[in-house]
Amino acid sequence: MDWAVDPGAWAGRLVFTRGLALVYLLAFVAALRQAPALIGAHGLTPVPRFLRATSWRTAPSLFRLRFSDRLLGAVCWTGIVLSAAALVGVADRLPIAGWMALWAVLWALYLSLVNVGQIWYGFGWESLLVEAGFLAVFLGPAHVGPPLLGLWLVRWLLFRLEFGAGLIKMRGDRCWRDLTCLAYHHETQPMPNPLSWWFHRLSPRLHRVETLANHVTQLVVVWGLLLPQPICGIAAAVMVVTQGYLLISGNFAWLNALALVLGLALLDGRWLAAVLPVERPAELSSPTWFSVLGLVVAAGVAVLSIGPVRNMLSPRQQMNTSFDPFRLVNSYGAFGSVTKVRRELLVEATDSLGPDAEWREYEFRGKPGDVHRRPPQWAPYHLRLDWLMWFVALSPAYGRAWLVPFLRTLLEADPATLRLLRSAPFGAARPAAVRVLLYRYRFTTRAERRATGAFWHRTYERELVGPLTSDDVAQRVR
């Protein structure tokens, strides 16, 4: 079945699978460090409670067989070991069945985390990683001819990711249509990075150019992905550049990194072969059964694509939606609306109550707090608590299920929770009370930056929660 193989795509497959393995590795490391405090048996939104309220049919997960924090750690460590093995090339030396087993286990483990992760795993890049991981199962190791249909499914994934994001913008906030959204976005995005201050300070004309370039890429150039090489490669190269631009201007977990990997995988194989420090395998086998399996998978994806395509074409398009419980084919999109004003939650604690109480801040790892601290670079690593704090600042409803339990763990000086933070005002000691304040933040002007050294200016707005003691929290949790 020579028609089912694209020998020239061996380099693209290599880039895709190694890049995917790296993202998997980061995702499992993040889960190992954060999941016990967020979704563990005693976490902010415990998995056992979630499992009792849902079913296999709506949220399939290996954790339905059994859940414990020890098993959660074992799943994360297994994912780390297998993704590291794939990253260094062990998977490429396996027979086809071994390759498929390794990638299938990675997919099943991460799907199991996502499907019990609740609000903490509700981001589009989680489904993107699951979907990309599923496709990797059927691409085959280095000594197998790259399956033509499998690589077309990679094209289809990148097309839906980019086109869905473009459509949601044009249907959403008016500022996308009048080309002014990026005059706000660099400042108000969930987690700015070290260069965001400078991007925000670009001229209004350059912000319009940024926005227009985004539309051209996601709504026009994206169609080139469905055309033969080298046109597909040129379109993919444009997306690699734009995703790289997004990568250096914000912290969007592994969304841009994985999109960039997808784009690199679709470059013309001759271009990749010219720069990769590896040689093309001397022989590429092509078992008939593997080609037939690829045909079956492609047909299945085509059927499952009906829902996402209808969603993209609908005037009521939904962002980041899964249409099947295994997240095999999803809809994507981000920032259909752009926040014009940035608000931040500051969590404070005191070691004594009374009129002379001294309140001191908890510092988070990624989100803005100290106005003199340069916004840090965390992507492609994902700080889930920091991201959710941004959403709560938009609307307290986002924290209804977990904000008070979070404050309780701070009052208990819970070690797992404190490890999610950059610093606690009283270290491992328990505070007497905590509270949550709402501030308005904005980037400093160039003059303010020179005069004060601060990256942010903040203005107090109101008290959102508190002060709360351990007794107060116990009553509210009940």
Image (tube, rainbow, N blue to C red):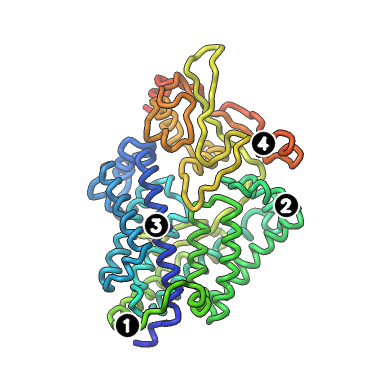
Residue found at x 27% / y 65%: 101
Q: Residues within 10 Å of mark 2 (few under 14, many from 20)?
A: few
Name the kind of residue labelled 2 in the image.
Leu
Say whether marks 3 and 2 touch (CB < 8 Å). no
Question: Is residue 62 something one can see in this rendering?
Answer: yes
Check disc 1 and report its element: helix, strand or loop.
Answer: loop
Q: Is residue 155 visible?
A: no
Q: Which numbered disc flags the more N-terminal residue, 4 or 1?
A: 1
Name the secondary structure under disc 4: loop
Residue that numbered label 1 is attached to: 286
CA separation, marks 3 and 2?
35 Å
Amino acid identity at mark 4: Ala
Q: Count residues near mark 4 (Cα–Cα under 10 Å), then give few for <14, some for 14-19, many for 20+.
A: some
Query: x, y percentage for residue 441?
Result: 64, 37
Q: Residue furthest front?
A: 277
**Residue identifier under label 3:** 24
Q: Looking at the picture, how far across and down is residue 18, in whole percent?
A: 41, 65
**Which one is in front, 273 or 2?**
273
Instruction: Name the residue that disc number 4 marks.
Output: 454
Residue receiving disc 2: 202
Q: Residues within 10 Å of mark 1 (few under 14, many from 20)?
A: some
Element type at marker 2? loop
Q: Which sits earlier in the primary sequence, circle 4 or circle 3?
A: 3
- Mark 3 or mark 1, earlier in chain: 3
Mark 4 and mark 1: Cα distance apart in space: 60 Å
Tell me the quarter of the picture where residue 303 sits.
bottom left
Q: Secondary structure at mark 3?
A: helix
Query: What is the spatial separation of the Cα atoms under label 3 and label 1, in whole angstroms?
Result: 27 Å
